[in-house]
Image: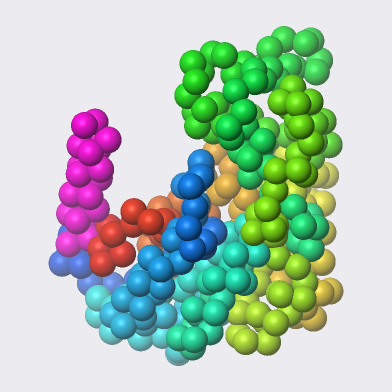
Amino acid sequence: MKKVLKKYIKNQINLIRHLSVKTFDFRSKCIILLYHRVLPGHNYNPYGTIINKDIFELQIKYLSKNYHIVTLDDLFNKKKLDTRKNYTNIAITFDDGYCDNYTYAYPILKKMGLSATFFLPTDFIGKKIPIWDWQLAKMLNNNDNNVIVENEKNNSIVINRKDFNHRNNDFIWNLSKYLKYLVPEKRDYIMKSIARQLGHSESSLFEDQDRCLNWNEIHEMKKNNMQFGSHGCSHTSFKKLESKFLKKELETSKNIIENELGSVCKYIALPFGSGDDYDQDTIENVKKVGFEKCFLNIHGYNKFNSDPYLMKRIIMNNEKKYKLILG
């Protein structure tokens, strides 16, 4: 009952916001959609990032019919945009670079003559494995063994699965939140410890659809007008990274993408991208490395004078009321 009520309230708020913006805000708007994974069916969606392929196609068809869908390049070029009063321009983006973007989303976009920008975590591209947070979720799914994560400095317990009283999704979210701030070497060490406590090898759990894109797939997509940007290297939150590690994440990912694709990598989407995942120092480093725009995982739309390094996005999923896209 609580879930039904919460969903109803959320939908009503969404409706009110959409109608309010449409009625009272007459400025042209730049909406950036944020997708992650697109699959024909799924039984396990711990982070809420998977959207059903058919729903994705319905959303894109409706939005392309009712709004002006453009590339990120064109979204910031007034000469190529429809700037009529109260008009909405939309760009499509994907974070995390999973291979289902190529298998399911890309053919739909190509068929409709649309482009999207895909943000790549370069450590996982072409490696036939999921990003670490999905590895974690797959390891913990359908395995009730207790897991304890200790502080390596003093052996104090950081997080204990028993404390969550079988609320597995809460445990996964809290553990992911802890791990996302660690440098890859420390995180990998803990991931191996978790695998041992669960009694299996990480790699034995992953299906082919869980891997990230490879460069052959990316090159084909690029030939058909898809665009690519950086999502860092290791999918680590940038906010607490030491300066040398942050610089490495930014420079290495940018250089890899530019060398592979032979074009300038102008855009970055911050890993996780919430207000807890960046600060002003993060943004200054993004600028220094040479990125022209920075995209967040913070809900909202943009205007022509919005800060190019704090671009909000509309987070898309199966539940999103896409006919109320301004909400």
Main SS category, magenta section: helix
Q: In the figure, residue 161 lies in which quadrant?
A: top right
Q: On the rendered structure, is 180 left or right of 111?
A: right
The answer, for residue 303, to whether it is visible in the render is no
Q: Quadrant of the N terminus?
A: top left
Q: Is residue 212 above or below residue 60?
A: above
Q: Give the residue at x 24% y 31%.
A: 2
Magenta stretch: residue 7 in it?
A: yes
Q: Which residues are magenta?
A: 1-19
Quarter where residue 156 is shown: top right
Whole-percent x and y of residue 186? Answer: 80, 32
Above or below — where is 300 with respect to 149? below
Q: Position of residue 320 (x, y in %)?
A: 33, 57
Say which of 298 and 199 sits in front.
199
Q: Is residue 90 above or below residue 80?
A: above
Residue at image location 46% in from the left, 81% down from the top:
70
Give x and y (percent) for residue 15.
19, 56
Q: Is residue 178 magenta?
A: no
Q: Residue at x 81, y 15 (%)?
A: 153
Q: Which quarter shows the C terminus?
A: bottom left
- Spot occupied by residue 306 in the image (x, y as percentages of width and height): 44, 64
Asked if residue 233 lies left or right of residue 231, the reply is right
x 27%, y 35%: residue? 3
